Amino acid sequence: MIFTQEDISQLEHIIAQATNIVLVNHANPDADTVGSALALQNVLLQMDKNVSVVGPNSIPDFMQWMPGQENIVIHDEAGKKVNKLIAEADLLFAMDFNAPHRTANLEKALLEAQAKKVLIDHHLFPDKDYFDLMFSFPNMSSTSELLFDIFRASSLKQYINQTIATHIFVGLMTDTGSFAYSCNQPETFETAAALIRYGVDVKRTHDLIYNNNSVDRLRALGYSLSEKLKVFPEHHAAYISLSSEEIYRYGDREGLTEGMVNYALSIRGVCFAALLTEKGDKIKISFRSKGDFSVNDFARKFFQGGGHHNAAGGKSHLSLEKTIEKLEQLIYKLNIECQ
Ligand code: 5GP
Ligand code: MN
């Protein structure tokens, strides 16, 4: 076990004391933040708690089959309601993010909240001052796997069911790229085995997540790879950039560009990849790397972001053209190697 029995006892005590509980997703929600929050919500509902899941923006299409996601309260759609839930909560859980600013338009309400705050997360550098209790394990594959370990080490274990196991499996499968990275330890596969024993249908779950593309999403991918991918073979780097006009052309749905950066990283000899997407007056950037080059450091240093060693995100308030220029200069300057 990676956490102490003391931490588990404290968690059990905090939950026992709480009536109104709010589970918080990070901005641009992925299946790890959503899966872990829905799993914990299911457990807490069985314990007769008032429990809501809230998030800054909407759930991408590929997760819209997940039981319970339809009740997630989204700040973009119901800002007042989300702020009220947070203000009235006596317990908050940060699921899969390390600091309030990762929740965009929820940040203010979270900073003002009087509730006890618990972190369950696997990102580096948690905001220690903000949280009352932290389960922060950057070596874990996913927040979902961590949450499952917490369940199994505590009295919450009795509530695990097939739906919860499926939520956990979705977070684990997606955060490891279908068991390809961040999972080179037997424990993660033992977790997967345990989840299957709880009734997870691997093929069905995989199909619902990965073989559930809209035509727009595939066409956006095709266009990006044929027209917008720029490769720097000597610098082991590649990036894709999409303007808001181009995104709009393909329907501008949440999740449209999810996973696209991985295609740039999959090129032989490329060890650093970026995806730049224009969103209103800012540019959102996803970074990925193979091997030693830390995109967490890179995103922190140059693009007001962070994340993990091999997967991070950031932003720029320059125009798309100027952001591309800045990124290209950095690619030329940095000596990125493939080990
Ligand atoms: P993605 O590229 O999939 O949006 O994000 C990759 C990873 O970096 C995720 O683990 C995400 O939580 C983290 N991340 C994305 N954007 C930001 C950001 O602006 N700041 C920080 N600190 N982390 C980010
Ligand atoms: Mn995660």
Image (tube, helix red, strand yellow):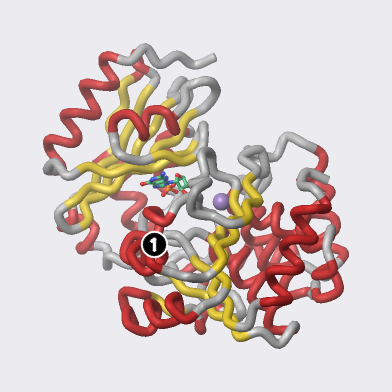
Residue 189: percent from the left, percent from the top?
Answer: 79, 46
> Which sits in the foreground, 18 or 256?
18
Image quadrant where residue 327 sits: top left
> Which sits in the foreground, 230 or 24?
24
Residue 125: percent from the left, percent from the top?
Answer: 51, 39
Residue 339: percent from the left, percent from the top?
Answer: 54, 14
Which element type, helix, strand or loop, lies under badge 1?
A: helix
Residue at 41 percent across and 39 percent down: it is 306
Residue 107: percent from the left, percent from the top?
Answer: 36, 62
Other-residue count near label 1 (Cα within 10 Å), few / some / many at <14 / 14–19 / ≥20? few
Residue at 40 percent across and 37 percent down: it is 287
Q: Is residue 332 above or below residue 121?
A: above
- Left or right of 316 on screen, residue 56: right
Location of mark 1 (residue): 111
Residue at 43 percent across and 67 percent down: it is 60
Q: Would the CB of label 1 be found within 8 Å of ligand 1?
A: no
